[in-house]
């Protein structure tokens, strides 16, 4: 059995879906009646030219934007508009196109921020460093250290994030998202601005996260080589509308996709 066949067997039923979602800003249509689903354990790519509505779609999925029309379904629950705190508590994690780390804090402390939703201690326990607070700190640090080992960033764990090169900052942001233990992880251009070696490393880590943790991945990416190599299915947006949806091979040969990327007049 090939690796591709083994991956296909692990993919399950849909866990996340958008149905007829439309989003406008004033008179500008960012999304128009877009529908697609995401299956358990798959790597699902969203692609399209600049301005196609890709980041807007991720922002709808985790509640940063509220669509004017449409439904989001997540593990059997229906939402007319997802809220960010609800998405996070239900297990939808997120990284951003522009790095959103605390530059003056160390790598370790940045990743610890991702454990916030898992922390149960109160202010009194923390202020007086009571045994319950100490036990919780040990538990969360152990989880963070495992992620640090997994992403091979042990050598920078005490380094302030602002001193790191861009590619490592992207990896730290991935680590922080993993710290919240998401079942679905939204990645907004995780390889943007990287050189070839950094892209290869990030591809490997995305696939490792999908395989090791069983995390369902939804990613936006402009590098078509990356998309075709690591994605199980691809949805294509253009001017806010879905123009194609299928396997990488199906999408690659779709004439509407070819026209969109070649800039054929609309």
Image: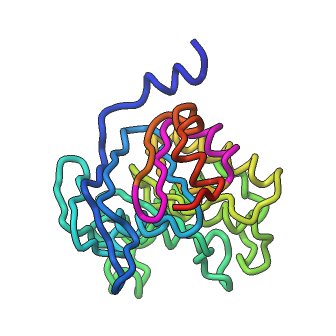
Is 93 placed left or right of 47 in the picture? left
State the extent of the magenta-drawn residues as a range. 223-241
Q: Residue lying farthest front?
A: 265
In the rendered view, does 213 fall on the left or right side of 76? right
Which residue is most to the top? 1
* Residue 242 against residue 95 in the figure, above or below: above
Q: Is residue 54 above or below residue 163?
A: above
Q: Is residue 142 visible?
A: no
The reply to whether residue 162 is in sight is: yes
Residue 200 lies, in percent from the top left, at: 75, 46
Q: Nearer the viewer, residue 64 or 171?
A: 64
Q: Quadrant of residue 9?
A: top left
Q: Quadrant of residue 91?
A: bottom left
Q: Identify the residue at horizontal 67%, vertical 82% (top origin).
A: 103
Q: Image check: 118 left or right of 68?
A: right
Scheme of image coloration: rainbow
Q: Is 96 on the left or on the right of 153, as rendered?
A: left
Percent of width and height locating residue 192: 69, 63
Q: Is residue 227 magenta?
A: yes
* x, y percent for residue 96: 55, 69
Which residue is found at the position 47% from the left and 56% from the top? 237
In the rendered picture of this protein, how many numbered marks are placed on residues?
A: 0
Q: Position of residue 246 (x, y in %)?
A: 45, 37
Camera-side residue: 126 or 206? Answer: 206
Specify the quadrant that holds the N terminus.
top right
Q: Quadrant of residue 88?
A: bottom left
Residue 210 inside the magenta-drawn segment: no
Q: Nearer the viewer, residue 81 or 265?
A: 265
> Toward the viewer: 4 or 24?
24
Residue positioned 43% across, 61% down in the render: 93
């Amino acid at each position: 059995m090939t690796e591709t066949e083994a991956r296909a067997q692990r993919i399950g039923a849909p866990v996340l879906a958008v149905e007829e979602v439309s989003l406008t800003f004033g008179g500008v249509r960012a999304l128009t009646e877009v529908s697609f689903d995401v299956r358990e354990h798959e790597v699902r790519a969203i692609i399209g030219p600049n301005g196609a509505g890709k980041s807007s779609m991720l922002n709808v999925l985790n509640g940063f934007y509220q669509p004017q029309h449409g439904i989001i379904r997540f593990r059997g629950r229906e939402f007319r508009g997802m809220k960010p705190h609800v998405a996070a508590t239900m297990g939808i994690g997120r990284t951003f196109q522009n790095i959103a780390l605390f530059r003056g804090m160390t790598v370790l402390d940045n990743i610890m921020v991702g454990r916030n939703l898992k922390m149960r201690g109160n202010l009194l326990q923390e202020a007086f460093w009571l045994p319950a607070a100490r036990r919780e700190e040990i538990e969360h640090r152990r989880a963070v250290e495992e992620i640090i080992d997994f992403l091979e960033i042990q050598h920078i764990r005490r380094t302030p994030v602002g001193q790191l090169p861009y590619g490592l900052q992207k990896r730290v942001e991935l680590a922080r998202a993993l710290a919240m233990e998401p079942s679905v992880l939204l990645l907004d251009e995780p390889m943007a601005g990287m050189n070839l070696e950094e892209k290869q490393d990030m591809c490997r880590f995305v696939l490792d996260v999908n395989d090791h943790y069983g995390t369902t991945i939804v990613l936006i990416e402009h590098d078509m080589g990356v998309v075709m190599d690591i994605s199980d299915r691809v949805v294509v947006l253009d001017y806010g509308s879905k123009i194609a949806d299928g396997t990488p091979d199906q999408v690659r040969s779709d004439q509407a996709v070819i026209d969109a990327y070649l800039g054929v007049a609309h």
